[in-house]
Amino acid sequence: MTPQASDAGRLDSKAPGGPIETRWDRHRFDMKLVNPANKRKFHVLVVGTGLAGASAAASLAELGYRVSVFCIQDSPRRAHSIAAQGGINAAKNYPNDGDSIYRLFYDTIKGGDFRARESNVYRLAQVSNNIIDQCAAQGVPFAREYGGHLSNRSFGGAQVSRTFYARGQTGQQLLLGAYSAMMRQVGLGKIKMFPRREMLDLVKVEGVARGIVCRNLVTGEYERYAGDAVVLATGGYGNVFYLSTNAKACNVTASWRAHKHGAFFANPCYTQIHPTCIPVSGDHQSKLTLMSESLRNDGRVWVPLEKGDTRKPNDIPEEERDYYLERRYPAFGNLVPRDVASRAAKERCDAGYGVGATGFAVYLDFRDAIARDGEDAIRARYGNLFQMYERITGEDPYRVPMRIYPASHYTMGGLWVDYNLESTIPGLFVLGEANFSDHGANRLGASALMQGLADGYFVIPYTIGGHFNARALPAVSTDAPQFQASETMARERTDKLLAVGGKRSINSFHRALGEIVWNKCGMARNEQGLTSAIEDIRALRAEFWENVRVPGDGGYLNQSLEHAGRVADFLEFAELLVSDALDRTESCGGHFREESQTEEGEAARKDDEFSYVAAWEFQGVGEKAKLHKEELTFEYVKPSQRSYK
Amino acid sequence: MSAGSGHDTMRITLKIWRQAGPDAKGGMVTYTLDTVSPDMSFLEMLDVLNEELLAKGEEPVAFEHDCREGICGACSLVVDGIPHGPQSETTVCQLHMRHYADGATIHIEPWRANAFPIVRDLIVDRSAFDRIIAAGGFVSVATGAPQDANATPIGGEIAELAMDAAACIGCGACVAACPNASAMLFTAAKVSHLALLPQGKVERERRALAMVGAMDAEGFGNCTNHFECMGACPKGISVENIARMNREYLRATLVSRDLG
Ligand SMILES: Cc1cc2nc3c(=O)[nH]c(=O)nc-3n(C[C@H](O)[C@H](O)[C@H](O)COP(=O)(O)OP(=O)(O)OC[C@H]3O[C@@H](n4cnc5c(N)ncnc54)[C@H](O)[C@@H]3O)c2cc1C
Ligand code: FES
């Protein structure tokens, strides 16, 4: 395959051609190796300690590179990855149910609605098996069968059981595995760990990423770090919606600052709204809690057949229930991909069939599974999720069906990277949810953990060598004017935030932004809504800089100031997200343009016009970014209208 | 504690530890909230307080939080004398206000331990935990090509026990609950998790000695079998793990003498 970057030179995906099965092998062979004695000379700055960052940091240090690692939380173990519940995919085919690397590749390309790069996805499927081996070797306590072998479960968008899990805490266990590997290197002196640091700018020297500027969140001081490569593993931007399943600290700041320095932002409009979250209960709501997709293995989704039926769910007889996913998608039933399940829930609720106090909820019912397998079996599978539900809602899901509604969960868009995971800024690599690769317009369940660890354990350790071999990297000092300029920019922005002295709280701005994006650029989007959203965002941003109130000063741990900085960046970034959605007049995956649907209301892609990655180049805040297209070619999986019927 | 108050909103009085910095003098400050909804989480109730403080031009209360769903281990409040508050096996971020009666008074303080110095208000420095892990809380396997994951079967029961121990979220409630501010439960959970699994057995002696050594060096207290830690642990980590670690430690001392 030849990457047909429409603007040649700048958007070269560097994806190798030839048979897809051997592309990664050949690519690795073609890359020159960095000699072990030289590795010590290179210093890598890794920002982020989620699955992607921690696995990268550990692996690079094991190879002999000098590594410095940064994260916002007080401990690297608390990165947002810790919250992942359901599982991680791999093509092991242990259950002998017909899985293979090719099938995982195929499902991921199809699940992504033919908007991902084939070469990357194939590599992801290939290394998926190594990930499971690596994690088992670290002592990750995966669920096992009585005979001692690993257990699998099914996830949406697949008809095989390929998901490995550790109760409902898979992310926690995988992250603790990567964290412990990283801490081992900290103990050995190979990694320097800098927690409670927020990266506020990227530093480029002669066009190459050579450092970062951070704010020490405890002392408020600005710190400069120089290195030979910068790895961003700073996660996704789902909190642009304010209410989301993401941890509170998730943000777009690091990616956005890199974007301002020339890193293209790809497909920002591809956001994932997860179908099974606990619905909003009031204005005080600060986040939404996911109920893992794995629940759809045993739970059946339904609403009353009758509009506005106010009976208690258990009083509604079987024949008066509409199991709308099973009705509309008999082949996949409750296990359709997320985008499909979310839209179907929205459709029922918009049509007046929703349940609960707000009417924006549907039932997820375990009655039949409990009758079939017994309560103990269900408890063993999902006990902690049921408990979590009970704590939040005060209702017992063993007796009463759960009420669920879609919520912002994951972002497929991210900084554009080539096959080496290098951005359009040389020496700046982007891993995990922060990059755009692999999931196209919709991510399948249990594939984010797989991708984060693939990037960190098995891709970056090879591809970063290409950068060190290819470029002369003269020593840089943190006294260089580029560092000075970055620090000045970061300081001035903080000072400006503190100086506004307005009346309105940071949280209220964040909430207002979330409402705009959710209502006009959420599960369904149209031209009129998107156009007005851009105006709304601009007006809100203007008000923010005139009327926000940020208490205290910058010289100590000031959580309000941290939040204000992140909201300020979201207010700039949201405009790019909406513009991208406006520009893409087709529907695909999580991006549903009402103007582009089939007669049955399914997403209608327009491959002739839109089979490309939209990579945006920053032109200034409030200026329309410049579009660069990376054309996608499909040699193996021929694009077809997705069907889960 | 009553389950739900019957009122739409509740009046809650809060007495909260405020401390401007590590060396500043701290003290309890009283606040009153009139519009607490029973559906709010405990942290959302603090959000409301902070919005009110902000509107009055006062500094919000600093408290640690991130996932708000009981898994990251960030939240760390002593509520009415109990780490994470009154509901068992529940982090404070998962606690909901429906468990309080209208008119209740609630005391909120930070974790208290020498090894966890206060940073600001309700936030403490728990980096000592990371250093304990760095000393030995891992299997020394580099990224590469280990054997197939199914090559070493692990009995379901052992895997479950290991998972029970591995469920620790590193919040430090065990330390906050212990009269001696000991970190035994935290350390034991990791030692146990790895000692139970074949992958972790190879380094078990080195690990037990190194982690216990690091724990002592950080200034945590001794374990004198009060077992308050288990009651406070939001993940229900059992003190059996402490017994297991003691055994591991003893074994390690003997083995290292044999080898030495
Ligand atoms: C509730 C929930 C459940 C999920 N369940 C699953 C699942 O079952 N299976 C699955 O495959 N996926 C799941 N996902 C998705 C998956 O968890 C995430 O996509 C993935 O963990 C992201 O990992 P990451 O390493 O890219 O980033 P993160 O884990 O988000 O880590 C980001 C890191 O970057 C740091 N950081 C961010 N900005 C800065 C900055 N400016 N300066 C310094 N540091 C910074 C943070 O401190 C953190 O360390 C779930 C997601 C959620 C929200
Ligand atoms: S905020 Fe994550 S455990 Fe409470």
Image (cartoon, coloured by chain):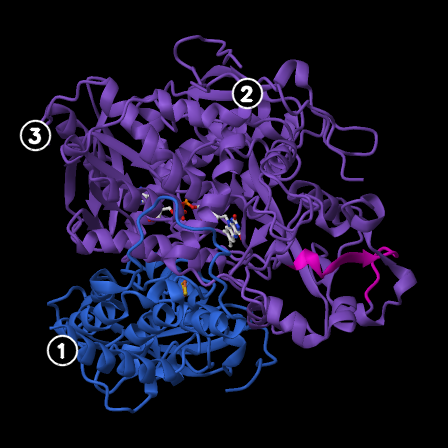
Whether label 3 touches label 1, CB < 8 Å: no
Colour representing chain A: purple
Question: Can marks 2 and 3 be said to lie on one chain?
Answer: yes
Q: Which residue is mark 1?
A: B257
**Residue indicated by mark 3:** A479
Instruction: State yes or no: residue A297 in magenta.
Output: yes
Q: CA distance from mark 2 to mark 1?
A: 58 Å
Give the numbered dot on residue A40: none
Marks 3, 1 in one chain: no
Instruction: Answer above or below: position of B54 versus A271.
Output: below
Question: Where does the C terminus of chain A fall, quadrant-wise?
Answer: top right
- Residue at the limit of the structure toward the front, as seen here: B258
Q: Residue at x 41, y 32 (%)?
A: A572
Residue that sits furthest to the right in the current view: A319
Q: Residue at position x 51%, y 82% from top?
A: B102
* Residue closer to the observer: A405 or B169: B169
For discs 3 and 1, the disc positioned in front in the rendered view: 1
Measure how far apart labels 3 and 1 are at the Cα level: 52 Å
Q: Nearer the viewer, mark 2 or mark 3?
A: 2
Provide residue A600's location: percent of width, then percent of height. 83, 34
The stretch of residues the image draws in magenta is A295-310
- Image position, residue A446 (x, y; %): 55, 48
Q: Is residue A312 visible?
A: no
Between marks 2 and 1 in the image, the one whose residue lies nearer the viewer: 1
State the blue chain: B
